[in-house]
Amino acid sequence: MVLNNMKKIINTPEGIIELELTAEEIAQREQDAIQAEQNRIAYEQKIAQEEQRKQSAISKLKAIGLTDEEINSLLGK
C-alpha cells in the first residue's frame, strides 16, 4: 500500500511547520494501514458470520413449527 501523505504538519506558536517523514515513520504508517485493512476485513467477516448464525437459528425455529411472530418475540423484535 502506498500512502500519499509523506509529510507531517506541526502547529507551533510560531506557525505551521511541515516536516518530511522519516523512513521509519513511513514504514510504520504503511504497517498501520495494512493492519487497519485487516481489522476491517475481520470485522466484516464477523458480522457476516453472526448474520448466518441468526438465519440458521431462525430456519431451525421455523422447522419446529414456530411462526414468524413467535420467532420475532424470542428475538426481541
Image (cartoon, grey):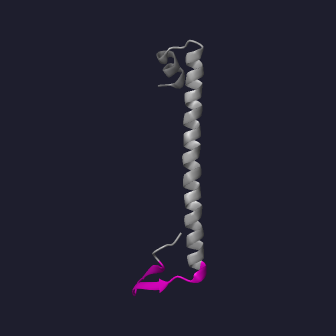
- The image position of residue 18, as x and y in percent, is 44, 84
Give the vertical position of 50 relative to 39 (above or below). Answer: above
Q: Is residue 56 magenta?
A: no
Nearer to me, 10 or 77 = 77
Q: Residue at x 56, y 52 (%)?
A: 41
Residue extending furthest top? 65
Q: Residue at x 56, y 30 (%)?
A: 54
The reply, left or right, for residue 77 in relation to residue 36 is: left
Give the vertical position of 27 relative to 73 (above or below). Answer: below
Q: Residue at x 54, y 54 (%)?
A: 40
Nearer to me, 69 or 30 = 30
The reply, left or right, for residue 5 in relation to residue 48 is: left
Q: Is residue 22 magenta?
A: yes
Residue extending furthest left? 15
The reply, left or right, for residue 13 in relation to residue 73 is: left
Q: Residue at x 44, y 79 (%)?
A: 9
Give the vertical position of 67 relative to 12 (above or below). Answer: above
What secondary structure is the stretch in magenta mostly built from? Answer: strand
- The image position of residue 70, as x and y in percent, is 51, 16
The image quarter containing residue 65 is top right
In the rendered structure, which segment of residues is drawn in magenta? 6-24
- The image position of residue 21, as x and y in percent, is 52, 82
- The image position of residue 30, as x and y in percent, is 56, 71
The image quarter containing residue 10 is bottom left
